[in-house]
Each structure stands twice: as C-alpha cells, then as structure tokens.
Image (tube, helix red, strand yellow):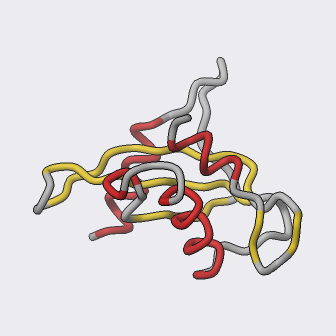
Amino acid sequence: MNLMMLLEMAHESHGERRALTSDAAVVGIADEQWGEAVAAAVALRPGATGDNALHDALCEHVRGALRSSRVPTRIEFRDSLPYNETGKLLRREVRGWLTKAES
C-alpha cells in the first residue's frame, strides 16, 4: 500500500464517518537535513475544511501503516488538483505549490 492510497483512504475526522478528501498527490520537496522530504497536496470534498485536526488525522493514518520517514512533513489542502487534458496529474505544478508554501 502506498502513501497516496493511504491519504485517499483517510476518511475519519472529528468523529464523523464521511469522506473528507477526494484526491491526493504526493511529491518530494527539498529538505536541508534529509535531502528530500515527503509532501502532499490533498483535494477536499465540497464543504470539508482542511484544519489542523484533519492534518493530524491524515498523518496518524499514514504513520500507522508506513514508517515515519514516509509521513508527509507538509500537507496543503486544495479544492482540486491540476490535471492535463488527458487526465495526467501535473506533479510539477503540485511540487511548485508545496515548495512555494514552504518559502
């Protein structure tokens, strides 16, 4: 099971059993200590809010299934993720968001 699948499966927050996320993308971003770190952009379903509780729930969900080096150091919540006309995720654009957000 990979990190994107885990993020997409994380459906519990605030005790409610409803899906809060609709899509996720995981990329590597520059990290001074490790060279590269895991970062994620998560698309939320309409009406869902990307708060600290959801951030923590997603990290705990990943931490429970994968080793600690695979837990995202940064999670950014978005309304949608960028895809091209053939349906391919535009990872460079996602990486740009996450790198810019870090600066």
Q: Left or right: where does residue 97 sit relative to residue 60? A: left
**Nearer to the camera, 43 or 12:** 12
Q: Position of residue 48 (x, y in %)?
A: 79, 70
Q: Quadrant of residue 72?
A: bottom left
The C terminus: image quadrant: bottom left
How many labels were placed on the picture?
Answer: 0
Q: Left or right: where does residue 76 sit relative to residue 29? A: right
Q: Residue at x 50, y 34 (%)?
A: 90
Q: Position of residue 7 (x, y in %)?
A: 61, 51
Q: Residue at x 32, y 58 (%)?
A: 99
Q: Residue furthest top?
A: 86
**Nearer to the camera, 22 or 71:** 71
Q: Residue at x 84, y 62 (%)?
A: 46
Q: Residue at x 21, y 49 (%)?
A: 36
**Nearer to the camera, 6 or 83:** 6
The N terminus: image quadrant: top right
Q: Position of residue 88 (x, y in %)?
A: 58, 24
